[in-house]
Every structure is written in C-alpha cells, then in structure tokens.
Amino acid sequence: MPVRATKRGAARPPFLPGADADVLICGASFAGLTVARELRATGARVLVLDRYEIGERQTSACAAPTEWLRNMGVEASIRQTFGSLLVHTPQVAKARWTLPWTFSTFDYPSLCEGLFEQSGDAVFDTAKVEGRTGTTVHTDRGDVTAGLIVDALGWRRVLGPGANVQPPEAALSRGLEVHPNGLGADLELWIDPRYVDAGYGWSFPALDELRIGVGSFDPHDPVKQPTLRLVDDVDASPDGYQGNWIPHRLRPAAEDGVFFAGDSAGHCLPLTAEGIRMAFYFGIACGRELRAVLDGRSTRDEALASYGAFSASHRFAFECMYAAQQSIRHLHGRPLDGVTRFFTRRRVSEWAFRHYLDIAPPSYAVPSPPAARAVAAVAA
Ligand SMILES: Cc1cc2nc3c(=O)[nH]c(=O)nc-3n(C[C@H](O)[C@H](O)[C@H](O)COP(=O)(O)OP(=O)(O)OC[C@H]3O[C@@H](n4cnc5c(N)ncnc54)[C@H](O)[C@@H]3O)c2cc1C
C-alpha cells in the first residue's frame, strides 16, 4: 500500500471557530488549482482545500493537448509528446490518425505543484469536505465560511443542493487503468467489443511507464477484467491500479450560490472522456468571473449568472459528443472498420481534430492572469 503524505491525527487540528476566506476553493486538482492560479493578483484571501495533499492522488492517464500545458505554464511536467493516434479495431490491426496538434502525457504531481506555485498567496490545507449550509462549508476539521465558494471536487459535486445522484444511475462513465514500467512510441486506442462494448481501451506511454486502461460509457459495465485482458494482450503487468467515475453530461455550473468547475459541472467531453483541458478551460472562466467580483466590477450574482451561461453555451458541442458516445455501442463490424479507415486520411482526421480542439482552444489560456502582487515587506 502506498504511504500517503496527507496529514493525519494531531497534524489535522480543527479549524479555528469562525474560520473564513474571501474565496474557498474545494478540490485541489486540475479545476481547483486553475481557479486559484487565476486569482493570484487579486490580493484576496484564497483558501484551497482537498482531502489529499496537492498532487498526491492521480486518477487519470494524464494526457492533454501540449499547447494547453504550455499556455498554463506547466510544460516542465511533460513526459512524452505524440502527433498521432494509433487505433485498433478487431479487423483493422493498425490505423494511424494524424493530429493537427500534439498531445502530451505529463507527470501529475509536478503539474499540480506547477499550478499551485503560480497561485500567489493562495493557502492550501487538507480537509474532507462534507457539505454546505449557505456560505458555510462543513469539513471533517470544522466549518469555513466564504462569500465565494467553488466546488472543484470532481464527479461527486459535494456542494450542490439536494441529494447527489450516485452511480450506476448517474450520467457517468467509468475508467480503470494500471501503470506498469515500460516504453511506447504511440498513443494507442482499442475500439473492440472483446474489451468493452460501449467504450474503448488505451495505452498512453509516459517516458518510462505505460498507462493502460479501459473506459466504459455504461456505468453498469465492469472495467477490471477488460483492463486485465488488455494488459495481458499487450504483454504488460497489472501494476498500480487507479480509476474513477467520469461525468459525461453537463450539469449547472452555477447553482445555489456556488461555482462548479471541472468534473463537478460535467465539464468532461463525452466520447473521449477528455476532462483535463476542460477543467483548465472552465477553471479559467470561473476564475475570471471571480476576479471581476473581487475587483468590484461585478456582483457575486452577476458572476454566477455569467459563468453559468458561459458553461451552458457549450451544451450543443457536449450533446453532439454525447450522441456520438452513445452510438459507439452500435458501431461494430464493418461500419466501425470503415470509420476507422476513413480517419486515416490526413485531411479528414486533421479537420475533425481541429474542430474538436476548438471546443476549448488553448488560446483561451492567454493572456495568463496578471502576475501575483509582490508580498509587502513586513515593517520591523
Ligand atoms: C482512468 C481515467 C483516465 C483518464 N484519463 C484522462 C486523460 O488522459 N486526459 C484527460 O483529459 N482526462 C482524463 N480523464 C478524465 C479526467 O481525469 C477528469 O476529467 C479530471 O480529473 C477532472 O478534473 P477535476 O479537477 O474537475 O476533478 P478531479 O481531478 O477528480 O479532482 C477532484 C479533487 O477533489 C478532491 N476531493 C474529492 N472529494 C473530496 C472531498 N469530499 N473533500 C475534499 N477533497 C475532495 C480530490 O482529492 C481531487 O483532488 C481520465 C479519467 C479516468 C478515470
């Protein structure tokens, strides 16, 4: 069992009575840390909470468009870069889809540390977030009150109003992968009912390790045995399991006075389950709205309305991808082979992937938020 760095026992004293912050960001992964980075120049008291230390608990294969990683200032975390996808179906042993841009796998702890280092004076602490009453968030270490609250807690959406929908009834996919040591030259995908009926398998090399897994769009379908079958077929060993539920429908990004970013708002693309770029994108949008409130340019309610509308304006793209996701189950045999071969035409794949990137283009990350203010020297 890995030993976690997360503080326990006496190292986790209760928060002081009346603990508060200007902005409370719950969740310190892709979405939460992006929001904190966006607020670095505001001078606001920003508190980021997570049940684990920053970067401690990776749950994904960690691949994202390279330009996004560069524009977020975390290129140092990149491990390997790819300009194409190698796709396998039962009849098409190898089909290479050229990308008009590159994807990179990265190191999760260094990416998270890289984002937090860019977050100015934001304070991080560990606590398990349990619920909320109005502007007060309840944690296992006591309550924290904040005028501006962000739920970046992932698919559980802990701070939403009412009962949360749980799997397998919720609109969630599921993914499981292993991380054996190994080398690979290609980002590989398997669209093959021998592994999973509605979903796909993958192998993402990251310098000295392979991230091999299977995702299913049907939350009722188990993914452990399919993952083991794929690992066996590619002659790897099943080391280091990690997995999670993955949302595949948008949910309101502003509700009951709370801002939701990343998986908590369903900001993960159906079909591809690409959620990291989307967490950056909507995390920036959320942070920009919060900045407007902190700078006195808008009220909290105006910011909630504006951010909610921005997220909802992406519904058409998400619904198109959801329709494609749902059709995968029926796309076997010759039609699947035909589509797979069609995408080997450079023009077709480049056209499709350019449109796909445009759903959340890397240019959205520039300009970066204003630099953090220099900390004033403490008077002697
Ligand atoms: C197996 C797998 C592989 C994937 N591979 C990719 C990929 O290669 N590329 C890609 O773009 N997407 C991938 N995804 C999807 C991607 O991981 C998610 O969309 C992304 O992590 C969402 O980021 P987030 O910050 O919204 O949420 P998360 O990354 O889930 O972060 C939520 C944070 O909240 C914390 N938290 C949760 N509950 C509590 C609580 N009660 N109290 C305190 N803290 C809490 C967690 O510890 C975590 O740090 C993959 C998903 C899976 C399951």
Image (tube, rainbow, N blue to C red):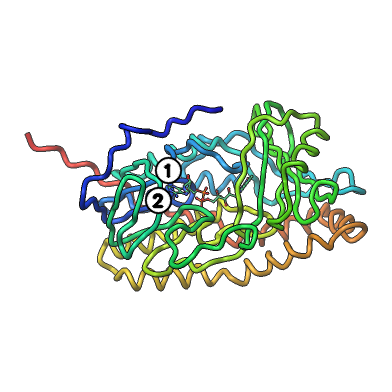
Q: Is residue 207 left or right of residue 225?
A: left
Q: Tell me which residue sits at (72%, 46%) in the image.
A: 223
Residue type beneath disc 1: Arg
Instruction: For ligand 1, tell me if the residue under mark 2 lies within 8 Å.
Output: yes
Q: Is residue 358 left or right of residue 27?
A: right
Q: Tell me which residue sits at (45%, 70%) in the image.
A: 308
Instruction: For ligand 1, tell me if the residue under mark 1 lies within 8 Å.
Output: yes
Marks 1 and 2: CB-CB under 8 Å? yes
Q: Quadrant of residue 219?
A: bottom right
Circle 2 crowding by C-alpha within 10 Å: few under 14, some 14–19, many from 20: many
Circle 1 crowding by C-alpha within 10 Å: few under 14, some 14–19, many from 20: many
Q: Quadrant of residue 188?
A: top right
Circle number at residue 51: 1
* Numbered disc 2: secondary structure: strand
Determine which residue is flagged by label 2: 129
Which quarter of the rendered picture does the C terminus lie within? top left
Q: Is residue 347 left or right of residue 286?
A: right
Residue type beneath disc 2: Val
Q: Tell me which residue sits at (32%, 68%) in the image.
A: 300
| x and y percentages locating residue 285 in the rendered image | 44, 61
Disc nearer the start of the sequence (1/2): 1
| x and y percentages locating residue 301 in the rendered image | 34, 72
Q: Extreme left residue here?
A: 380
Q: Is residue 357 visible?
A: no
